[in-house]
Image (cartoon, helix red, strand yellow):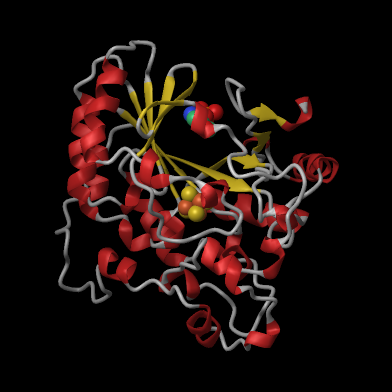
Amino acid sequence: MPKTIIIEPANSVLNLSPGWQQQLSQTITETSQLLQALNLKPENFAHHSEANRQFKLKVPHAYINKIEKGNAHDPLLLQVMAQSQEMQLTEGYNTDPVGDLSANKTPGLLHKYHGRVLLITTGSCAIHCRYCFRRHFPYQQQQAGRKQWAQAIAYIQQDNSIKEVILSGGDPLVLSDNKLDELITQLESIPHVTRLRLHSRLPVVLPDRITNTLVNRLAISRLNVCLVIHANHANEITSPEIKALGKLKQAGIHLLNQAVLLNGINQHIDDQLNLSEALYSAGVLPYYLHLLDPVQGAAHFNVKLDDALKLIKQMQNKLPGFLVPRLVREIAGETGKTPANEL
Ligand SMILES: *Cc1c(COP(=O)(O)O)cnc(C)c1O
Ligand code: SF4
């Protein structure tokens, strides 16, 4: 498909909302502020300050706007609110559940799967998701800061089996357009690299991040670009997100979604049907539905394997095949994601 380039000025005078970087600097990090913004009382919530110290609450206003006021069980709120269950120690749950620490080739570069490497471009995210396996990840040592990019680039250059580079994090779209441009330019100079993939939650967390500069940069790349977004619930996809995704789609970028199956958030069949429909309407195909990584502090989000398999069966009965995500688990040491029916 030919790639269209959007020629609107990057900063249209008609756009009155603050820029994405300003929005990022104004994320809410205090539980009291979050509860106040949502008309919730502290007693509505089994909040835990120690859980919040371990992994600090972080949520941008653009995401808070999608949370229903006064609803302590809102599926978006539950993804960001520090809760007392996080302090329960659960057997079998640990702090590096997917074995990332042993797959490091150069700082921030993970080469676990054939033909593709994953580059941790930054440790930061615009939002802190309570279930995240990276809540314990030692980002300071592991991220490929700009200085370490040279090492990662050198590693990719010397292995011509690497066809695809996945920019991950943290969230790679937290990086400025300039930094991304610099990194993408270096990757484009490696002849055997043909695909660029970005894994980002920002299209549904801070949709203004999808600037025209970014869209245009991806559109002109010689690499075949894919953006894997991370939406867990249909409520995350509203008109600003649809608009941002539409620009990317129009620019010829492949759009996929990965979600995590989360008890209390999206474990019901209707949640999954609505999510697949909302994604498709926004030009995104469901890719993976991840079983929860057994990360310490997230056990209350777990959905049992049997229930997860039943859920997928129900989805297969209700949806076209291309709207049913692959249910997978990431297992340390494996050379790819493991399909749930092989577990
Ligand atoms: C998930 C993952 C990938 C990408 O896997 P796909 O099945 O291609 O989506 C690549 N590298 C690492 C280290 C991963 O964790
Ligand atoms: S890495 Fe992704 S899932 Fe984890 S906290 Fe950041 S945005 Fe959320």
Q: Nearer the viewer, residue 223 or 179?
A: 179
- Splitting the image into 4 quarters, where does residue 107 fall? top left
Q: Position of residue 71 (x, y in %)?
A: 66, 80
Q: In screen coordinates, is 2 left or right of 163?
A: left
Q: Quadrant of the C terminus?
A: top right
- Splitting the image into 4 quarters, where does residue 289 fall? top right
**Whether residue 164 is visible:** yes
- Splitting the image into 4 quarters, where does residue 158 fall? top left
Q: In screen coordinates, is 64 left or right of 287?
A: left
**Whether residue 249 is visible:** no
- Vertical side of 39 occupied by 327: above or below: above
Q: Nearer the viewer, residue 269 or 200?
A: 200
Identify the residue at image location x=26%, y=26%.
151
Q: Position of residue 245 (x, y in %)?
A: 40, 52
Identify the residue at image location x=16%, y=64%.
11
Identify the residue at image location x=34%, y=73%.
26
- Vertical side of 170 occupied by 263: above or below: below
Q: Quadrant of the N terminus?
A: top left
Q: Nearer the viewer, residue 264 or 30?
A: 30
Number of numbered labels in the structure image = 0
Identify the residue at image location x=76%, y=45%.
318
- Vertical side of 122 occupied by 22: above or below: below
Q: Position of residue 247 (x, y in %)?
A: 33, 51
Q: Position of residue 33 (x, y in %)?
A: 48, 83
